[in-house]
Amino acid sequence: MDEERKHSRWEDFELVHIDDDLIILMVTKMMVQELDDQISFESFSSATDALDYFNKSKDNQRRWLILLDLNMPGMSGWDFLRELAKGDYEKRCTVVIASSSVDPRDTDRANADALVKDFISKPLYDNKIQNVIEKYGPA
């Protein structure tokens, strides 16, 4: 019964990590699998690819918890947020900025964005990932 509950908890919910550092993406995936192997996880090293993924998935009922790096080549995290806001994602996306930035302007800007719910600093240790999942993941 507990396994069924776990599965259904994540059935329509996905953790998506967007970061240009492939090692960080790999480590996050391993940490997430260790925490709960029922968590649906996707990762993208390009914000453009992630945006395409969300746009192609627009018609399904899935909700997303997004870990988003800010400083990436091409489309930055800020650019990604601006494009995401153009779609109808506010009710389906919870964005947590995961950045090594120590610039208080980034924190202020994140706090002012309707899609952003939190700002955590890198490195992403397993307790940070667990806290984000517990706080913003499915009930």
Image (cartoon, rainbow, N blue to C red):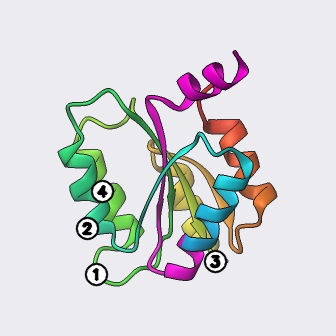
Identified at 57% across, 70% down, the residue is 105
Q: Nearer the viewer, residue 56 or 82?
A: 56
- Labels 2, 3: front one: 2
Quarter of the image for residue 133 reads top right
Mark 4 touches mark 1? (CB < 8 Å): no
Q: Can residue 93 be seen in this snapshot?
A: no
- Specify the label residue 74 is tagged with: 1
Q: Marks 2 and 3, Cα distance to the nearest angstrom?
A: 21 Å
User: Which numbered disc, 4 or 1, marks the residue that appears first in the sequence?
Assistant: 1
- Labels 4, 3: front one: 3
Rendered location of residue 32, percent (x, y): 65, 54
Rendered location of residue 87, percent (x, y): 22, 42
Identified at 57% across, 81% down, the residue is 23
Read off the residue under disc 3: 100
Q: Marks 1 and 2, Cα distance to the nearest angstrom?
A: 8 Å
Q: Marks 3 and 1, Cα distance to the nearest angstrom?
A: 18 Å
Q: Three-letter amino acid code at disc 3?
A: Ser
Rendered location of residue 110, percent (x, y): 53, 57
Read off the residue under disc 2: 48
Identified at 18% across, 46% down, the residue is 56
Q: Marks 4 and 3, Cα distance to the nearest angstrom?
A: 20 Å
Callout 3: helix, strand or loop?
loop
User: Which numbered disc, 2 or 3, marks the residue that appears first in the sequence?
Assistant: 2
Q: What segment carries the magenta color?
A: 1-25
Callout 4: helix, strand or loop?
helix
